[in-house]
Amino acid sequence: MTDIKSMDLAEMTVFFQQLGEPAFRAKQVFQWLHRGARSFGEMTNLSKALREKLTQTCSLCPPQVERKQVSTLDGTIKYLWRLGDGNCIETVLMRYHHGNTVCISSQVGCRMGCAFCASTLGGKVRDLTPAEMMDQVLFSQLDSSLPISNIVLMGIGEPLDNFDTVLRFLRLVNSPDGLNIGMRHISLSTCGLTEKIDKLAEYQLQLTLSVSLHAPDDETRSRIMPVNRSVGVENLFACCRRYFEKTGRRISYEYAMIDGVNDTDWQADLLASHLKGTPGHVNLIPLNDVAESPLKPSRRVAAFQKRLEQQGITATVRRKLGGDIDASCGQLRRKRMREEQANM
């Protein structure tokens, strides 16, 4: 079966011509799919014969809501979606004054092994398709009745470990005939796959690159982020400088504040020295408690921020949303996996 929803409009046009259909049918179907049609039967401006032909040759597997949590504190919505093969992924819809942001997953599970993240527990199962990534945006918007203006690729998985799929998703979601969400409204987070960052820079996309840094020294970063053992902090910062020089886009550095691990004064000073001379922004993240992890939230967030700012580094503390609904990445999926194991 053909994954028609992962096609861009040009590819879909060729596909319809091969079916012996006029090119304008491609645009009709493309628009239906990007409005959230769950079946070809809904596409009322197509002939019955064409709808049946598409049903027989193409697959549409819209996700089902396995679980939904709504925060009573700030209206944040967390979805656990069940995919066509039974796997589950998470999406979080966050409400801000400037618009609604959806945080989507790029893989089922993750193989990066970061010590503070629930997404990586159990490892990577598979990559998502472009359609499965886009469906998270579409159906979160449709289910919540909230228009989505911003997307962050910071959910389950490492986006640059699913590089080609993520690029195709970005083209789809940016399409004027689809959701038409501009690149400047999209953020992509990576744990620091330097070869893929260099490759991404070649496309000169106007998105925001967020680097999950979490420690400024090799000893600490390698301990909590295994990817650093093959990359190294110096190499990562050199790569970030190349990215800025190539794209002109300032990088955001994600820094989860972990008690007694990465929150000392000397680490703040070392981080500041790495960032001197290259435009960047440090986003300090109060750590979410993960039941399976011994790592705990830092009590020095404000002091760490002040020390960075004293050295000319722009640093903000991320507003914590959905604290009452397992809104941290991977927690809801992990809870479901534990329940399934208990019932076996």
Image (cartoon, rainbow, N blue to C red):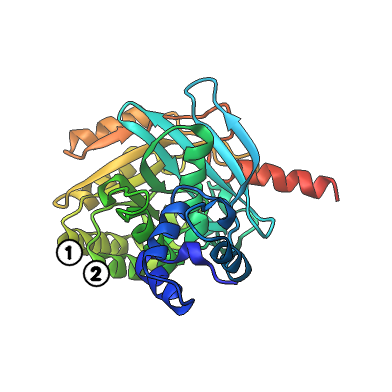
Give, as a three-letter code, the residue at label 2: Glu
Does 11 sit left or right of 41 as displayed? Answer: left
Using the image, determine if residue 84 lies above or below residue 50: above
The x, y position of residue 212, in whole percent, is 39, 51
Q: Earlier in the sequence, mark 1 or mark 2?
A: 2
Dot 2: element: helix
> What residue does disc 1 label?
246
Residue 13 sits above or below residue 88 on the image? below
Q: Which one is nearer the viewer's eye here, 220 or 255? A: 255
Q: Which amino acid does label 1 sit on?
A: Lys
Q: From mark 1 to mark 2, how far is it between C-alphas? A: 8 Å
Residue labelled with disc 2: 202
Q: Is mark 1 on a helix, strand or loop?
A: helix
The spot of residue 10 in percent (x, y) is 35, 69
- Quarter holding residue 289: top right
User: Between residues 194 and 233, which one lies in front from this camera angle?
Assistant: 194
Q: Where is residue 177 in the image (x, y as percent from the top left)?
A: 33, 54
